[in-house]
Image: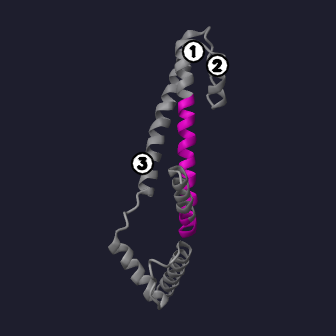
Amino acid sequence: MPKSWVKEAWTSINEEYARDIDNNKYVELTKSLKDIFRDSLRLMIADSCVQVLLNKHSENAAGVLRNLGYKYKFDPANREQYHKDLARVMKNLKMLNMELEANKKAYATKTTVRQANKEHITETLVSLSKFMNYRIDPMKVTVREYINIMNQYKLEIEINLKQWQQKK
């Protein structure tokens, strides 16, 4: 079996697991990642157009910048205004780049996962086994069963928390 197939299968399994274990977080992270890719692409395109326009006027490059929201004239006949327009775009691109880097750091922070070690897995299975009133065998439980048990456990904790808060 080619490595690419195995990698694809694991990616699919991990995505399904993430969706099932915490759908809201999965949706939020997926949206963040799409935003990062979209903004990176827009930044690259805009920067490339500016570099072209700095060397030689191109109506195509100017049109792309206008389509990206930069509503300047980019008129090469008025050199002073032309360079001011490009300077404004470059200043905006620097700000967008800083914002993009901050978004990348935030995404990295959200996706940093504590590496599960044997002890942590064992502790989790002991807690879930106690909750379910039977021993959960790690060699036999499926991912789907594990997720269902975890979701039941979370729901029970939430219910107990609400009851405890109402008693206060």
Q: Colour scheme in the image?
A: one colour
Q: Which mark is residue 105?
A: 3
Residue type at numbered disc 1 = Tyr
Nearer to us: label 2 or label 3: 3
Q: CA distance from mark 2 to mark 3?
A: 35 Å
Residue 30 drawn above or below residue 91: below
Nearer to us: label 1 or label 3: 3
Q: What secondary structure is the stretch in magenta mostly built from?
A: helix
What is the span of residues highlighted in magenta in the rendered image? 17-45
Q: Which mark is residue 119?
A: none
Whole-percent x and y of residue 97? 47, 36
Seen in the image, is 57 located left or right of residue 100? right
Q: Residues within 10 Å of mark 3 (few under 14, many from 20)?
A: few
Mark 2 or 3, nearer chain start: 2
> Label 1: which residue?
82
Magenta run includes residue 28: yes
Seen in the image, is 155 located left or right of residue 77? left
